[in-house]
Amino acid sequence: MSSTVEDRDLATSASRSQVPLLRRAWDYMPSLIRRPILRLMRSERIRLRLLAALGIRDETDFIALGSGGADAIEAALASLKTQGVSGDYYEFGLYRGQSFWSAQRAADRLGIGGMRFFGFDSFEGLPEVEGNDRKAGIFVSGDYRAPKDQVEQLLIHHGFDMERAVLVPGYFDQSLTPEVKHDHDMGPAALVMVDCDLYQSTVPTLAFIADRLQEGTIILFDDWYCFGESEQHGEPRAFGEFLDAHPEWTAMPLQRFSGYGQSFVVHRSNPGTLPAFDQGESLTSNGG
């Protein structure tokens, strides 16, 4: 086994050890048991208490109890600054905006000027779950609903500068259009946070961001491992298919974070070509 693979396995084991015991138990719970619990979680009060018990969020449901996601965002921004990669921050799937807020705060702390922040969410929760993701019984329609005005109020309350940000409402298969890019003069992507949970939401997200990628863009997938190691569900499936369709890029894994997240940096396979994709060490465009 190569040292690179060994290092990644060690990092994976360490990341798993950071996941609270109740959360790990939840991951291994059969879907037949999980589904009724998820239905109960449609009650806001029950949801917040359970998320707090699982070690995911405090009961205000804004500040994450673990700092893994915020740390990953700051580490990515610091790396981008060192590498001289400039551009905007894109986040797909805001919920109540904690990661979005963390990104701007980290950019300010690192002295990264000129970065704009684009946030996309239905603000109505998850869509009706389809296909393999539905069979897994992890998510249900309406999960993570937070109205847009409520998200804006939370962000402003915590010191977020809305003058440098745009929030785009709508389900991704309808809202991610060329007109949105044009209307808001969206620039190259420096850092992309994909927090879509589902395959069906990640597919239009990647299609939308494709022509905003540049050499050195970092992509954070917040829910990469939420279906375990399966590549037939959620974000891994969507990213693998996207890379198969766009062989002009290489996406190299950077780090695992927050127990379920995985980050990648993208490089052009041929610097003389136009943007597209090809994956690196952990995923390949040939499915190897």
Image (tube, helix red, strand yellow):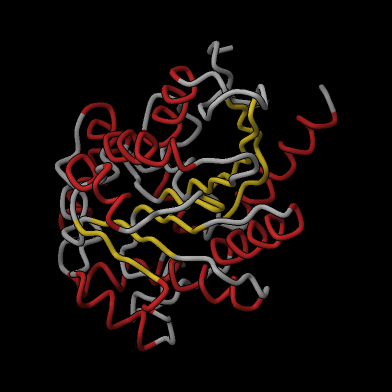
92 or 131, nearer to the observer: 92
Q: Position of residue 248 (x, y in %)?
A: 56, 22
In this view of the protein, which residue sits in the foreground, 273 or 27? 273
Compared with 118, 105 (above or below) is: below
In the rendered view, tell whether residue 144 sits above or below residue 49. Answer: above
Q: Is residue 269 left or right of residue 64?
A: right
Q: Nearer the viewer, residue 195 or 171?
A: 171
The image quadrant where one finds the C terminus is top right
Outermost residue to the right: 3
Quarter containing the N terminus: top right
Q: Position of residue 141 (x, y in %)?
A: 16, 48
Looking at the image, can residue 188 be seen? yes
Quadrant of the image occupied by residue 95:
bottom left
In the rendered view, tell whether residue 138 sits above or below residue 284: below
Q: In the image, residue 157 lies at what x, y percent?
A: 36, 88
Q: Residue at x 59, y 77 (%)?
A: 108
Q: Is residue 24 above or below residue 159?
A: above
In the shown orientation, is residue 151 left or right of residue 236? left
Q: Quadrant of residue 35?
A: top left
